[in-house]
Amino acid sequence: MQNNLIYRIPVLGRLSESNLSLFAGLLAALLTTGFAIWFLKAENEYVIGFLLALAVAVTLGVSRLGGLGYVGRAFSDHEKLMNGAAVCGVLALAAVFREDHFTLLMIAIVLLYMLAGLGLTIQFGYLGLVNLSGASFLGVGAYTSAVLLAHTAVPPLLVLVIGGVMSALVGCLLVLPVLRTKGHYSAVVTIAFAILFMSFLQVNDTLGGPQGLATGEMALFGWGFNTGIELENGFYGSFYLNYLLLALALLVIAFALVKRLERSWIGLSMDAVRLDETAAACYGLSIARWKVVGFTLGNFLIGMAGALYAMMLGFIAPANFSFGDSLILVSIVLLGGIGNPWGLAVAAAIVVILPEKLQMIQEYRFLLFAGLVVLVLLFRPDGLLPRGMRNYIPGGGARS
Amino acid sequence: MDIGLLGQYVINGLMLGMMYALVAVGFTLFFGVLNVIQFSHGDVLMVGSFVGYTAILALAAIGIDNPIIELLGALLASVGVVALLGALIARYLVLPLRSSPPLNTLLITLMLGTVLRESVRLFFPDGSNPKRFPALLPDEAFTFGSFTLRVDSLMLLIAGLLLIVALHLVINRTRLGLAIRAVAQDEETAMTMGINFRLVVLVTFAIGSGVAAFAGVMNGLYYNEINFGNGLLLGVIGFAAAIIGGLGSIYGAILGGFLFAALQTIGSVALPFASAYKDVFAFAVVIVLMAWRPTGLIAERTSERV
């Protein structure tokens, strides 16, 4: 029915609503990329402030006019195209800033936070398992990769996987208490683990104590990642470009996995477990099984992100994995909209890039983000981009 | 180990336990009336110790240097301001979120804790450095062989004990306490019986936060130092203690507080590994305890309503 609606737009002629939304989505992707380039290039604080105000004003204006609905439909109707557009956007950013170490590092950190956020999304958004020790699992992955690269000859790509596996294994220690407890009681288990892990790192001399550890570099097929890219035609890229591209590749795989998971019967079961355990159990779903699967898978993704994070930074210390950082990870998931992977992109970009660009708020960043999350919870509890309705008939279009 | 040293550890453990118990009581009171976790409680305590510190400085600035007046002023200011803060938190952050999932309340108060912590760090003059808390209690000590009993520790222990007894009397012997217990048991029935639900909630939050402020001043007097980051760990420990005891039970919270202090003391003294691992040990035991008794040692006796 909706697909029969025809819109007349002067330049474009006749468009079905579906195509119109595709057009809106691609336009949004293009504008966002352009904006990101402009924003990352801006040095002057006034320009940055102006750009922020512009972004807020345009977003609010477009959402008033109902434009965001089209963008949302573009993501649900033309998913593959839009995903491709987003990846192209990141690649365009990487190409523009190929020589700028710091900007590339920031973008790569955003990507890794998104990867960790995907892990939390499975636990938090699909299963309703509160994990307030996200940074600890990031730390498990990071320390695993530091130790393995320093003392063994395991190929770095494998180290990434082992980092994830270690994180999942450590998570298994918590599985029993997490399964048996509910709500606040399960929150205390993860908080206790976060504090335990942090103080363990600080007092353990083998792992460097409070000073931390230096980590080795990533290498693929003999190509060391800590050297810049130089081609014969004069192309030069910072060594962070390597990490950015790898992080992007990992993120794309994880993203596809999480999206498929959400759409499949597994995601449906997880949603049922979150919404009502008793009812789900009555319909024959095994609560314990899904919780274990989701918790472990989530920790695996977080650990993998941590392993790459450590290689990229080259140096890790317990302070990178404190309880405060776990809270930052949770704020990213919450700010973006629990259960919506695209929300993660927006939230991670805000949380990572904003303080770096606005040096004057650097000092106040914990205060500002905590305040921001308080406001979001009070006035927009579903986050900036709330998770959409489940699309039960694939290809049938979203019928709202 | 000789008996004097053992006594020293016991006194230290009791002191820690008293502080944890006072924090845990707040958690359990809030959980009782509203079924929420007010996670900024530890930072509220830290605010309490800073208010007390400011009051002492202010009194000293206007020329009063009698330690008893200073102490009373610090306690009054701290408990008063923080009780108000607690009521405001309940009014503007916790009550508006009643219809949303309990997790949101946990998160909003966690974040509020960060806001409080960072505000003190950034806006209190030189707030990022530890502050020396003036020693207002007599510094004599009784010595029995190798065992030294400091008078100030003894006074703090007695004060804490009196506060717990007073709290017990308020909860069990007054109309207010009856109202609190009624709301905790069943808020709708309590409302039909003419109990002003909002008022009871606000008063409960004020009481709980006031107790935390007392613990904050106590913490300052005992360690002679306050720091903007003190609250987080105390809050987490208080929460863990309340949970170990079983949320909603005041006696469970007190038990949990002393149990946690005992674990830390055992971890630092009696176990073969370095004492630096005492927190690792204590939190590991908490996790194991949670796996064993998922709703605390004194478990909630409710069956789930579907």
Image: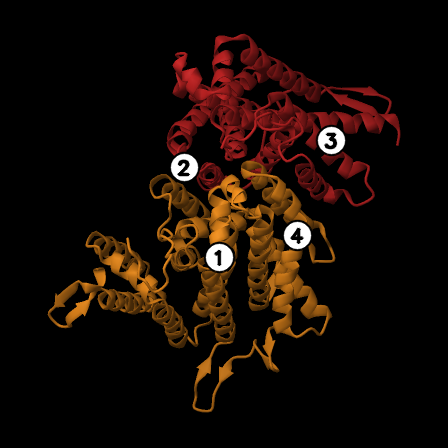
Query: What amino acid type is highlighted by mark number 4?
Result: Cys
Chain identity of mark 2: B
- From the image, tell me which residue sits under label 3: B262
> Of discs 1 and 2, which sits in the foreground?
1
Q: Position of residue A231 (x, y in %)?
A: 47, 88
Residues packed near mark 2 inside 10 Å, few (<14), some (14 to 19) or many (20 plus)? few
Chain identity of mark 1: A
Disc 1 versus disc 3: distance between alpha carbons?
Answer: 48 Å
- From the image, tell me which residue sits under label 1: A265
Which disc number belongs to residue A172? 4
Disc 3 versus disc 2: distance between alpha carbons?
Answer: 37 Å
Chain identity of mark 4: A
Q: Secondary structure at mark 1?
A: helix
The image shows residue B174, relative to residue B27, as above or below, that is: above
Residue at position x 73%, y 28% in the image: B12
Q: Secondary structure at mark 2?
A: loop
Residue A198 visible in the shown view: yes
Disc 3 versus disc 4: distance between alpha carbons?
Answer: 28 Å
Residue contact between numbered discs 3 and 2, judged by CB atoms under 8 Å = no
Residue A301, image quadrant:
bottom right
Query: What amino acid type is highlighted by mark number 1?
Result: Trp
Q: Secondary structure at mark 4?
A: helix
